Amino acid sequence: MKLIKNFALVVVSLISDLWLGLGIKPEVYDNRSSVKTKGGYILFVLMAASIAITTVVWVSSRIY
């Protein structure tokens, strides 16, 4: 259970870092890594979160 809590904490921390990063000016980042649309960025974050949550639920169901 501690492993799942730590993993969830890491995922929440990464999502919060991404959320706070929305306010940073584009000049800070390299042009090759820029996202063209905010919709694509939000889709990426939602997909990553859903994959992480699905993995945690699947692993916890296999353990218990």
Image (cartoon, rainbow, N blue to C red):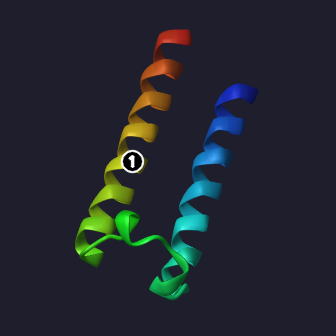
Residue at the spot x=53%, y=67% of the render? 18
Q: Is residue 3 left or right of residue 36?
A: right
Q: Nearer the viewer, residue 8 or 26?
A: 26
Q: Quadrant of residue 2?
A: top right
Residue 64 seen in this snapshot: no
Q: Nearer the viewer, residue 22 or 9?
A: 22
Q: Which residue appears farthest toward the right when viewing the image?
A: 2
Q: Which residue appears farthest toward the top when viewing the image?
A: 63
Could you tell me which quadrant the C terminus lies in? top right
Query: x, y (%) of residue 47?
Result: 31, 50
Residue at the spot x=45%, y=39% of the render? 52
Q: Is residue 1 above or below residue 26?
A: above
Which residue type does callout 1 highlight? Ala
Residue at the spot x=39%, y=63% of the render? 33
Residue neighbourhood size for the residue with mark 1, other residues' Cα within 10 Å, grouped as few (<14), some (14–19), many (≥20) = some
Residue 58 seen in this snapshot: yes
Could you tell me which quadrant the N terminus lies in? top right
Tell me the residue that label 1 is attached to.
48
Q: Is residue 64 above or below residue 15?
A: above
Query: x, y (%) of residue 27?
Result: 49, 85
Q: Number of labelled discs?
A: 1
Q: Quadrant of residue 31?
A: bottom left
Q: Is residue 26 above or below residue 54?
A: below
Query: x, y (%) of residue 60?
Result: 53, 21
Query: x, y (%) of residue 35?
Result: 32, 70
Q: Which residue appears farthest toward the front when viewing the image?
A: 31
Q: Secondary structure at mark 1?
A: helix
Residue at the spot x=59%, y=56% of the render? 14
